[in-house]
Amino acid sequence: MASAGVCASLLSLLLLLLIGIPPASTLTEFFIPGPPPYPHWTAGALQEIRYRTTLTEYTIAIWQQFEGAAKLGPILYRTSLRPRLSFSRRTRGAERGECLTYMFRLLLTGAETTNGPDQHFYWLVQTYDLDLTISDKFFLWLFEGNSSVQGKASSDRQQQSSGFFYISAALSSASPSPSPSPSASSSSATWSSSFSSSSPLSPSSSPSGSSSSLAVPATTGGGSKATGVDGPQSDSTIAGARDISAGAKAGIGIGAGVAGLGLLSAFLLFIRYRSKKNRELQALRLNNYRDLNPSTSKTAVPPAIVAGQPPFELPGMQARPVVELG
């Protein structure tokens, strides 16, 4: 009880000292989305929102930009203050350390710390009840205070708007779905682990009183497979294509062998046919030559030699009697 009383006394003293100290100037700045060039985001994608602020209680809402006007959408992020420490129970060693840390933070910042991150959060890109066909230009607006003062400008409350960004409709289910990248997976894990009272909200109502629900657009990411012509193929289709490729290779090899044998056989038959024709042609030429030149025969006797021999009488008994022709 004595330690609790000492801690409460120190806290009271610090509060008295802070009465005469003006509050530190607040600083709020958006990095994503930030200055130009303005980004283009697709509905259904997980996007990190990065900013810097010294405020401890604030809300961030999405606004749709029109010609000279803007429309308030749901609140995407808000913070809540930590409950004040209770000194009615016995303060132990760890609790005394937390008490001192709390007082030093109060001395430096002049306000209680936020119950969550004040530099970034992850947002599932969507348009909620805002009509994308009217305008695809949006921005974020940070207002100091709770959700009831979002969009209500006041001189005693800080506010800061982000740079513009554009939202396009999600891809159709017939288009190929990209595989999730490691960065998106880690971002999703971080987003899931940072859920608390100051985590990005699933808005059920907007400050203007209009009700809306968190409608997650249907995407084809993850393990789903598209059925379009250009979509990813199933394992059975890929295996069948591999089998067809192997069979086609075997058929091509057999066909090439048969074609080679056919060409070789045709070549040999052509050579044989040409040789036979050459022999027949040579024989025909030789016969024609003999018919045109009969004197070249080995058995023919030259007529000049036969006519030049005079008649003679055989000797002895072989002589024939002279017969007078009548």
Image (cartoon, grey):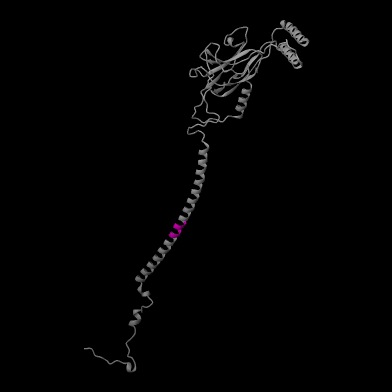
Q: Where in the figure is residue 233, as x and y percent of width and height?
A: 51, 35
Q: Position of residue 145 (x, y in %)?
A: 62, 10
Tell whether position 268 is magenta.
yes
Give the vertical position of 83 relative to 322 (above or below): above
Q: Is residue 301 left or right of residue 148?
A: left
> Going by the picture, which residue comes out furthest to the left?
326
Q: Which residues are magenta?
A: 264-269
Q: Note whether 114 is above or below 301 in the view shown.
A: above
Image quadrant occupied by the C terminus: bottom left
Q: Quadrant of residue 164?
A: top right
Instruction: Residue lying at the far bottom in this picture: please name it.
Output: 316
Looking at the image, which is closer to me, 26 or 101?
101
- Outermost residue, right side: 2
x%, y% of residue 267?
45, 58
Can you tell which quarter of the image residue 302 is in?
Answer: bottom left
Tell me which secondary structure the magenta stretch mostly adopts.
helix
Q: Residue at the location (71% across, 5% down)?
A: 19
**Quadrant of the image for the N terminus?**
top right
Residue ID at (49%, 51%): 254
Front position in the image: 270 or 156: 156
Residue sitting at x 51%, y 43%: 243
Is 228 part of what is drawn in magenta?
no
